[in-house]
Image (cartoon, helix red, strand yellow):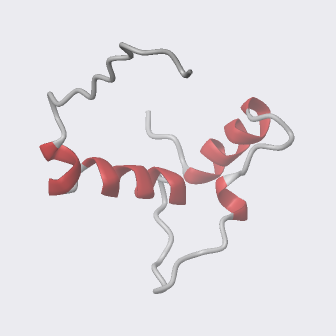
Amino acid sequence: MIVSRAQLEQAEDQALAPYGMRSRHSQGRRYAEEEHPYRTVYQRDRDRIIHTTAFRRLEYKTQVFVNTEGDY
């Protein structure tokens, strides 16, 4: 079953805290895009980030910070 964008936005209203930012209150894009019937603007942003080459290059990379000394 495909869920419409309106249904996803209603689910956001129920799941997010009152101070959470809803995708319908997004201030839009620098360059206008037509709305997608099934994905919210935040889902589109997430997908853009995940599928970029720069982000994919970080796969299997780990940052390790060794704390051998105290703060003082």
Please tell me in which quadrant of the rendered image residue 62 appears.
top left
Please tell me in which quadrant of the rendered image residue 59 appears.
top left
Residue at coordinates 76% horizontally, 43% vertically from top-left? 20
Give the percent coordinates (x, y) of residue 4: 54, 48
**Extreme-front residue of the structure:** 72
Residue at coordinates 73% horizontally, 30% vertically from top-left? 15
Is residue 20 depicted above or below 39 in this figure? above
Give the percent coordinates (x, y) of residue 58: 18, 40
Q: In the figure, is residue 58 to the left or right of 10?
A: left
Give the percent coordinates (x, y) of residue 25: 73, 63
Residue at coordinates 52% horizontally, 54% vertically from top-left? 42
Is residue 3 depicted above or below 69 in this figure? below
Q: Report whether residue 40 is seen.
A: no
Q: In the figure, is residue 11 to the left or right of 45?
A: right
Judging depth in this view, the residue of 67 and 47 nearest the camera is 67
Give the percent coordinates (x, y) of residue 14: 78, 33
Q: Report whether residue 12 is seen.
A: yes
Q: Quadrant of the C terminus?
A: top right
Q: In the figure, is residue 18 to the left or right of 64?
A: right
Judging depth in this view, the residue of 62 and 50 nearest the camera is 62
